[in-house]
Image (cartoon, rainbow, N blue to C red):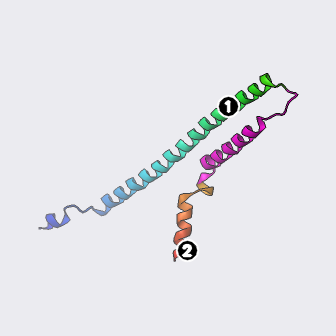
Amino acid sequence: MNDQQNEGQFSPKESLQVIADMIEKVQNDKMRKLAKKRAQFKLTATYLVITSLMLVAIWYFTTGTSSYFWPAWPIGIFVFSILITYMEAYMGTSLFSEDKEYEKLKSKKR
């Protein structure tokens, strides 16, 4: 009967191992998401630099240096976009942290 009662239960050592495995999985998931954001930043930055160079080339070869430098507007938007993506990828753990916001809400509830 004692074996039937213990069936499906973990020993304290097994429980700690299960918890440690769960914590490791959560940490790995967070690191994978962060790695994905950083890779996305690099890809986005590359695309925006190439696009900016193409716009400057179009401006240069169609109107020359004596005309209004209109590529400044889209390049400015690109720079802003790159900065936001950078902040999310490399500073996101402190600025845009879901966990941090959760903790704030949790502390207000008390």
Q: Residue at x 47, y 52 (%)?
A: 27
Q: In this view, does 43 lie to the left or right of 66?
A: left
Question: How many residues crowd around disc 2 within 10 Å: few (fewer than 14), some, or many (20 or more)?
Answer: few
Q: Is residue 65 left or right of residue 15?
A: right
Q: Which residue is drawn at 27% across and 62% down?
A: 11
Residue 21 drawn above or below residue 53:
below
**Considering the numbered disc 1 on the image, is that residue within a helix, a strand or a loop?**
helix
Give, as a three-letter code, the residue at label 2. Lys
The mark that comes first in sequence, 1 or 2, is 1
Residue 107 drawn above or below residue 97:
below
Residue 50, given in percent of the width and then of the height, sits at 67, 29
Q: Residue at x 63, y 33 (%)?
A: 47
Give, as a three-letter code, the residue at label 1. Thr
**Considering the numbered disc 2 on the image, is that residue within a helix, a strand or a loop?**
helix
Residue 84 drawn above or below residue 45:
below
Which residue is under mark 2?
A: 108
Residue that sits furthest to the left in the current view = 1
Residue 81, given in percent of the width and then of the height, sits at 67, 44
Q: Is the magenta stretch mostly helix, strand or loop?
A: helix
Residue 51, numbered label: 1
| Residues drawn in magenta | 65-92
Between 91 and 83, the residue placed more toward the observer is 83
Residue that sits furthest to the right in the current view = 66
Q: In whole angstroms, how far apart are the C-alphas of marks 1 and 2?
A: 46 Å
Q: Is residue 41 left or right of residue 106?
A: right
